[in-house]
Image (tube, grey):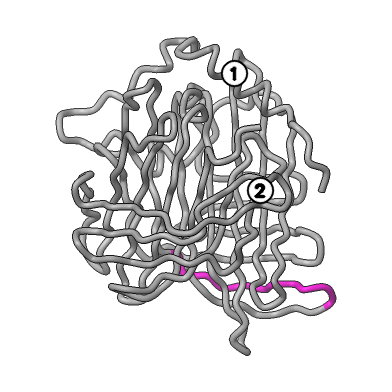
Amino acid sequence: MTRRKSRLTMLLALAWLAGGCQRDGASAMTEAAPGAALVELPRDDGPHEFSLLEWWFWAGLLHTEDGRSFGFHLVFFEARVLGVPFRVSHFAVADPRAERFRFRVERERVPPAGPRPGIELFHAGLSARVADGRHRLSGQVEEYGLTLELEEKKPPALHHDRGHLEYAFGGHTFYYSRSRLEARGVLRLGERELPVTGRAWFDHQWGDMGTVFEQGWDWFALQLDDGRDIMAFRMRVLGEERLRGGTLVPREGPPVPLAPSEVVIEPEESWRSPHTGCVYPRRWRVKIRGEEFVLDPVLEDQEIPTSVPVYWEGLATASGAGTGHAFIELNGYCRR
């Protein structure tokens, strides 16, 4: 694919310059009683016109009847700066057996649509609809086509402080996940149609996050075979870790916030992209409350080199204190 700077470069630059200059006092947090959640569902499933940046993200591990595995991720970004809305969509499929990673990036300027209830997203043949606890996804990238239905198996997990975080370096975010979705559908591989089943993860995040893209971050979503799910992250400012935390979602029961002291994230080894020359960690040790998990990518090359910022997003195996798989996002390793 052509590796060029996108219109999102200008968009993010405007976001950084705009800072808190949103209309109608939009940088204010949702009003809520002490101790109440700051994210209210299903109200907050839909888009938030006050946010500079918002995204809906799905990632999953799929299996065919003969034991072949595939990873995927689908994400819709909406950026709203100075009244000009843009949409950027990413879709990728990882095929470890064939050692292939296929991705596409679509961009468009969209007219202001006003508040829309629920999740109903369409862009250049990519789609996501959510209703009654079921997520219906569709996408095509080169020879790989995917049609999935995902069923929610756990209640949503609100991250940080009741679903909200103020960044020390500026800006804020609202953030929740649906950490375990049961997947069923069809993967089209050329002329073949392969029934698939598996598990998926959903994230929804929005807020005044212009300054976030000046930093770097490492994000991990673990889905363990024992039924636990874990979100862990760290943020790097000028190359140094400045923020760390996460959420443990048990097999049953409410999500548990993880304090910085309960999360340790250690990179091991490295991989240099043949597309950009950027160097990323390629293996990780993630310790959660003293339990250590080792995360190994199923493919080294799962970089998205045509977007701004350039980042690595992919599927990994999880071993150590528990077995399963993980989704990893690495940002800030490629400054171009």
Say if mark 1 contacts mark 2, CB within 8 Å: no
Q: Which residue occupies 67% across, 57% down?
A: 92
Image height of 214 relative to 306, above or below:
above
Q: Is residue 222 left or right of residue 131?
A: left
Image height of 210 relative to 245, above or below:
above
Q: Which residue occupies 50% across, 50% down?
A: 329
Label 1, label 2: how far apart the Cα atoms are: 24 Å
Residue 25: % across, % down:
41, 11
Q: Compare marks 1 and 2 and give the one earlier in the sequence.
A: 1
Element class at badge 2: strand
Q: Which residue occupies 73% across, 49% down?
A: 275
Q: Residue furthest left?
A: 34
Q: Residues within 10 Å of mark 2 (few under 14, many from 20)?
A: many
Q: Which image quadrant: the C terminus?
A: top right
Magenta span main SS: strand
> Was residue 184 drawn as part of the magenta stretch in this picture?
yes
Q: Quadrant of residue 302?
A: bottom right
Instruction: Give the residue type at disc 1.
Output: Val
Q: Nearer the viewer, mark 1 or mark 2?
A: 2
Q: Residue furthest front?
A: 269
Instruction: Give the residue type at disc 2.
Output: Ile
Residue 75: % across, % down:
59, 47
Q: Residues within 10 Å of mark 1 (few under 14, many from 20)?
A: many
Identify residue for label 1.
81
> Was residue 262 drawn as part of the magenta stretch in this picture?
no
Q: Quadrant of residue 315?
A: bottom right
Q: Which residue occupies 71% across, 58% down?
A: 139
Residue 41: % across, % down:
36, 43
Which region of the structure is painted magenta?
A: 181-191
The image's mark for residue 304 is 2
The image's mark for residue 185 is none
